Image (cartoon, rainbow, N blue to C red):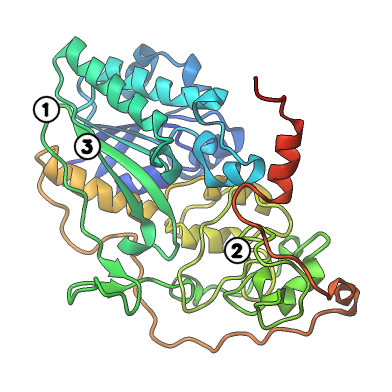
Amino acid sequence: MKRLAAISLFTGAGGLDLGFEAAGFDTRVAVEIDELCVETLRENRSWPVIARDVGQVTTEELLKMADLAVGQADVLIGGPPCQPFSKSGFWATGEARRLDDPRATTIDHYLRILEEARPRAFLLENVEGLGFKGKDEGLARIRSAVADINARHGTLYKPEIAVLNAADYGVPQLRRRLIVVAARDGTPFRFPEPTHFEPDAEHSSDNQSRWMTVWDALHDLAEPSDPALAPKGKWAGLLPSIPEGQNYLHHTERGNGEPLFGWRRRYWSFLLKLAKHQPAWTLQAQPGPATGPFHWSSRRLSMREMARLQTFPDDFVVLGSVTDAQKQLGNAVPSLLGEVLARAIRTQLLGSPPVTGDLTLLRQPVEMMPPPENPAPVPFAYLSLKGEHAAHPGTGRGFRAIARHALLPPAE
């Protein structure tokens, strides 16, 4: 199989690169500013890594390290930091800062290198929020910049854009990402059709498999003994009382537990616990002490468990503490999704023979699984919270929104 050349920006712990590697690409150079991610990359692979802010890296330097000339790279890949466009940012402030956030300039650096390197194809990954209707200025900037590149250099990049759920392609995690793909010669790109479906979904077909579950991913891993996995903080003692696959809503007047919280007064991932028979919810990069998803055994996930849910190869070790590993893995693209997209780019846009055989990073389903864990009683210390709690009044009317608007100057 002919190996193809990839340039990687915002590489992180290498999730996307590992997928492209499995599809026959070599990362000829990677750019990553986070020191721990750089250590992880160098521990596991021999990829040349430029350990600096991409804004301080010239395309000339990047191509020299990759031993490539302008136009020789087969693909440019990367996911500029997504916080300015994320849902979690919206929850924290009521309004994601988007292009007003200085971190959004990372998109411009990606586009600068795209113009100066002019690879045969490119893939840009970001959060779904980059393309939200009415708030898609980031996506508009990408389209406009690519049109300008074409006008200046005679290239024919025509971005194809889709929001993909990683679970639809065999990743044991519900993770929606916006993907932009284009070829320099204008060859249109067709996103791969989903191969997995939600059980009982109406759109399923005979050639699809069910979604991969957490149990499929983790069933053969030994129970970790690391004390760092014990939950911490004010709500740690309440976690065992949450049933498998549920969150704090269990302890509201509409749930089956004790009325300790108001309906939808907390964020969704508060005390969220995995269920064996379902895919995981999206792994967070920097969760608070009560932010899930937690293991059904009422603990944090280990590095290897998170790596499995992100479909990293088992020989890949993410360095640092559990918190360090969570940050690196929570920011990563699921490697299997990268492999699926890389195979499609290889055959559709680069004229290479298809990679034969099953997907390297796709695990096999397990049909037998143990029953759900039984939740524990609510500890006495939390019973003082029992009582009537108002439900969330609606978007823009919660405590944070009211407090924020109270600080705004009056309209002129």
Q: Is residue 408 left or right of residue 381?
A: left
x and y percentages locating residue 44 in the rendered image: 48, 45
Sequence-wise first label, 3 or 1? 3
Sequence-wise first label, 3 or 2? 3
Q: How many marks?
A: 3
The residue wearing badge 2 is 293
Q: Residue at x 72, y 43 (%)?
A: 402
Outermost front residue: 412
x and y percentages locating residue 60 in the rendered image: 35, 12
Label 2 sits on a secondary structure element that is loop
Marks 3/2 in contact by CB < 8 Å: the verdict is no
Label 3 is placed on what type of residue? Leu
Check disc 1: other Cα within 10 Å, few if <14, some if 14-19, many if 20+.
Answer: some
Sequence-wise first label, 1 or 2? 1
User: Compared to 235, does 343 lie above or below?
Assistant: above
x and y percentages locating residue 333 in the rendered image: 43, 48
- Picture quadrant of residue 133: top left
The residue wearing badge 3 is 4
Q: Which mark is residue 1?
A: none
The residue wearing badge 1 is 185
Q: Is residue 351 left or right of residue 238?
A: left
- Picture quadrant of residue 374: bottom right
Label 3 sits on a secondary structure element that is strand
Q: Residue at x 41, y 29 (%)?
A: 138
Quarter occupied by the C terminus: top right
User: Compared to 214, does 28 lie above or below?
Assistant: above
For marks 3 and 2, give the one nearer the viewer: 2
